[in-house]
Amino acid sequence: MAMATETRPAKISLFDAVLDNLHARYARYTAYRRALEELSSLDARELADLGLSRAMIHSIARQEAYGAAA
């Protein structure tokens, strides 16, 4: 005898959605900190070679992690 089984996608609970949101926010923040650390480690000459100044480091790291709209 053949059985038919129906598979349904699991419902995402509110708790799972909150955890996913926190995970995504932490990943973006980690990317921001990593970019900030890498750019901060460059000296003035290396930044100038890239066409950057030290004052631009935070905005560039933010743009890298959060996108152009941030």
Image (cartoon, grey):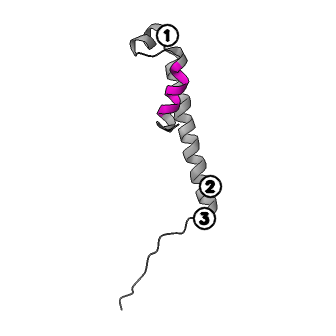
Residue found farthest to the right: 15
Q: Is residue 50 above or below residue 6?
A: above
Q: Is residue 59 magenta?
A: yes
Q: Which residue is mark 1?
A: 43
Q: Is residue 68 magenta?
A: no
Q: Which residue is mark 2?
A: 18
Q: Position of residue 43 (x, y in %)?
A: 49, 10
Q: Residue at x 39, y 87 (%)?
A: 3
Q: Which residue is mark 3?
A: 13
Instruction: Count neighbours of disc 3 (C-alpha within 10 A) and say few if under 14, some if 14 to 19, many if 20 or more.
Output: few
Q: Which residues are the magenta region?
A: 56-64
Residue found farthest to the left: 2
Residue found farthest to the front: 69
Tell me which numbered mark, 1 or 2, is placed earlier along the sequence: 2
Q: Is residue 54 above or below residue 29?
A: above
Which secondary structure type mostly characterizes the magenta part of the structure?
helix
Instruction: Count neighbours of disc 2 (C-alpha within 10 A) and say few if under 14, some if 14 to 19, many if 20 or more.
Output: few
Residue type at mark 1 is Asp
Give the CA distance from mark 1 to mark 2.
40 Å
